[in-house]
Image: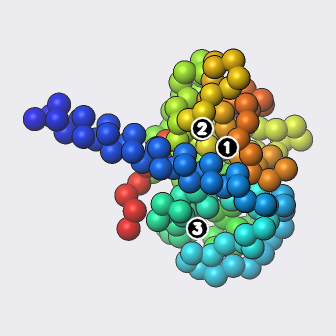
Amino acid sequence: MFWISAVYAAEEAASWNERLVKAAQERTKQNVTYSGRYISIRYPGGDVPENIGVCTDVIIRSYRQLGIDLQQLVHEDMRDHFELYPDNWGLKRPDTNIDHRRVPNLQVFFSRFGEQLPISKNAAAYQPGDMVTWMLHRNLPHIGIVSNRKSSDGQRYLIVHNIGLGPREDDFLFGAKITGHYRFAPQAK
């Protein structure tokens, strides 16, 4: 009986990851200008204008396409456990307009509610649907979703992310120092 349950769970996870990757790949068809400026947005279900965004917006919009509102989930956890989140911005309370759009906050959230996986130099450790975070030059945190398409040499999966030129799918897995590796496959409400 356990084996059947484990197989079913694995199939469900694979299906979720495939859907997440497809949603992320859809983001690459959108014309988005890189902009991380602070904007007041509605809550829950708020978003910055669809023609702007940053790396976190690729993640947020991909999950939202599957019925998961990271704005609400991150806010609710920060409201209840604010002390667990980074104090990088000098805030005294959560802010529904921006908290979910910050890589360090997503790292805490995914660690708490998903799987925090080992950081590896082995490309095979990173599977489609995984989230990877990096530290770019000038200490700029970055995040992307592992694709199901491989690099031209077939050695590693591509990454769907927005590193400044709008959402792209390219060979970036080892393009900067990896700071986190996560898997988050919740149930849609």
- Residues at marks 1 and 2, CA–CA distance in whole angstroms: 6 Å
Give the tally of numbered discs: 3
Q: Name the residue carrying label 3.
A: 71
Left/right of residue 176 with respect to residue 143 in the rendered view: right
Query: Circle 2 — which element?
Result: strand
Q: Name the residue carrying label 1.
A: 160
Q: Earlier in the sequence, mark 1 or mark 2?
A: 2
Question: Dot 1 surroundings within 10 Å: few (below 14), some, or many (20 or more)?
Answer: many
Residue 138, given in percent of the width and then of the height, sits at 89, 41
Q: Which residue is found at the position 70% from the left and 41% from the top?
A: 169
Nearer to us of marks 2 and 3 is 2
Residue 117 visible in the snapshot: yes
Pointer 2 with pointer 3, Cβ within 8 A: no
Looking at this view, is 130 or 165 the one in front? 165
Residue 65 sits above or below residue 139 on the image: below
Nearer to us of marks 3 and 1 is 1
Residue 189, given in percent of the width and then of the height, sits at 38, 68
Left/right of residue 158 with respect to residue 165 in the rendered view: left
Q: Name the residue carrying label 2.
A: 146
Q: Earlier in the sequence, mark 3 or mark 1?
A: 3
